[in-house]
Image (cartoon, rainbow, N blue to C red):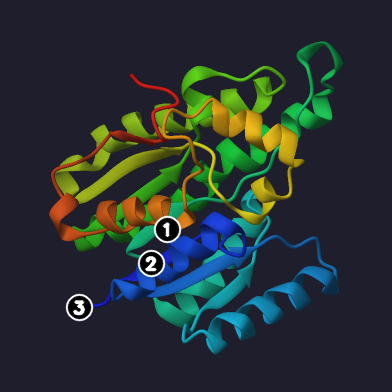
């Protein structure tokens, strides 16, 4: 039976791969896109939906500022009106606001913590009770290799992504007997448009630090999402899957 899967930030490179892979696994997939109330982002979402439809995928994107609890409540209300409860929640939306700590202002700290960490609480809060009531659910949090090993210039990002797995481990213990699993995926560098836009010289230095000698394909990260969302992953909870080509081993 098809499940309803919500992927936040689905318009990005990894998010789009996750949406496609979950759909190919037989799920009904919906997503969110950032909104500030202007038409710009809505137009981008419409264009993305049309592009996906041309590729054979029927996705619906909802406006949501994941850094705002009220916006998450509003998006959840629309989603529930259209689809009922969500079975699979992938907390994927995230941003970077890089700066060395000495020069990092409170604005960059707050933006990243709100978008990359607090959002997991904001969105999960909307759908977890329904999962528990049904006795089945999947919460999948997308962290980062830099939340495991740290990265200079990213104290905000590294703190948020490390905190995301703390959220995973604690929540997993609360709902594991209710048929709901909570897990983290910590990707390394993937060949998304954002990474490929990095200057070639810098990108080559990044690749040189990866033992496998290449970037991940977005589908390789998405494949782990499909697994964690499946029935056969029912005995895995509170775990963090590192997918980084051997760049950081624990």
Q: Indicate left or right for 191 with 137 as reference.
A: right
Q: Which residue is mark 1?
A: 219
- Circle 3 sits on which residue? 1
Contact check, label 1 and label 3, Cβ < 8 Å: no
Q: Quadrant of residue 231?
A: bottom left
Q: Quadrant of the C terminus?
A: top left
Give the residue number, with chain letter if any, for mark 2.
21
Residue 46 in which image quadrant: bottom right
Q: Is residue 211 left or right of residue 195?
A: left
Q: Nearer the viewer, mark 2 or mark 1?
A: 1
Tell me which numbered mark, 1 or 3, is placed earlier along the sequence: 3
Q: Position of residue 175 (x, y in %)?
A: 24, 42
SS category of the residue bearing label 2: helix
Q: Are marks 3 and 2 in contact (CB under 8 Å)?
A: no
Between disc 1 and disc 3, the foreground one is 1
50 over 25 or under it: above or below: below
| In-front residue for pair 152/106 | 152
In this rendering, does residue 228 appear at all?
A: yes
Residue lying at 51% horizontally and 84% vertically, measured from the top left: 55
Locate residue 76, reporting x and y percent. Answer: 52, 65
What whole-number distance in Å separates the C-alpha atoms at marks 2 and 1?
Answer: 7 Å
Q: Are marks 2 and 1 in contact (CB under 8 Å)?
A: yes
Secondary structure under tag 1 reads helix
Badge 2: few (under 14), some or many (20 or more) residues near its Cα, within 10 Å? many
Q: Is residue 126 visible?
A: no
How packed is label 1: few (under 14 Cα within 10 Å), some, or many (20 or more)? some
Q: Cα distance, mark 3 to mark 2?
A: 16 Å
- Residue 6 percent coordinates (x, y): 45, 64
* Alpha-carbon span between mark 1 and mark 3: 23 Å
Residue 54, compared with residue 227, is above or below; it is below
| Nearer to me, 112 or 246 | 246
| x, y percent for residue 85 | 37, 69
């Amino acid at each position: 039976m098809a499940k309803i899967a919500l992927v936040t930030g689905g318009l990005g490179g990894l998010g789009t791969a996750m949406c496609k892979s979950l759909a190919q696994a037989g799920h009904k997939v919906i997503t969110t896109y950032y909104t500030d109330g202007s038409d710009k982002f809505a137009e981008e979402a419409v264009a993305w939906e049309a592009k996906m439809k041309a590729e054979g995928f029927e996705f619906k994107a909802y406006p949501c500022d994941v850094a705002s609890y009220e916006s998450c409540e509003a998006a959840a209300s629309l989603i529930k009106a259209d689809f009922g409860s969500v079975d699979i929640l992938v907390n994927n939306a995230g941003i970077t606001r890089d700066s060395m700590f000495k020069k990092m202002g409170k604005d960059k700290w707050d933006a990243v913590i709100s978008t990359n960490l607090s959002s997991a609480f904001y969105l999960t809060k909307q759908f977890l009770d329904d999962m528990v009531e049904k006795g089945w659910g999947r919460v999948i949090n997308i962290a980062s290799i830099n939340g495991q090993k740290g990265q200079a210039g990213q104290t905000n990002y590294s703190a948020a992504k490390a905190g995301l797995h703390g959220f995973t481990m604690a929540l997993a213990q609360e709902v594991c007997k209710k048929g709901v699993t909570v897990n983290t995926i910590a990707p390394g560098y993937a060949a998304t448009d954002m990474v490929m836009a990095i200057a070639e010289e810098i990108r080559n230095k990044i690749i040189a630090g990866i033992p496998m000698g290449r970037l991940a394909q977005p589908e390789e990260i998405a494949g782990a999402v499909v697994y964690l969302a499946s029935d056969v992953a029912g005995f895995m909870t509170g775990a963090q899957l590192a997918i980084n080509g051997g760049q950081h081993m624990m």
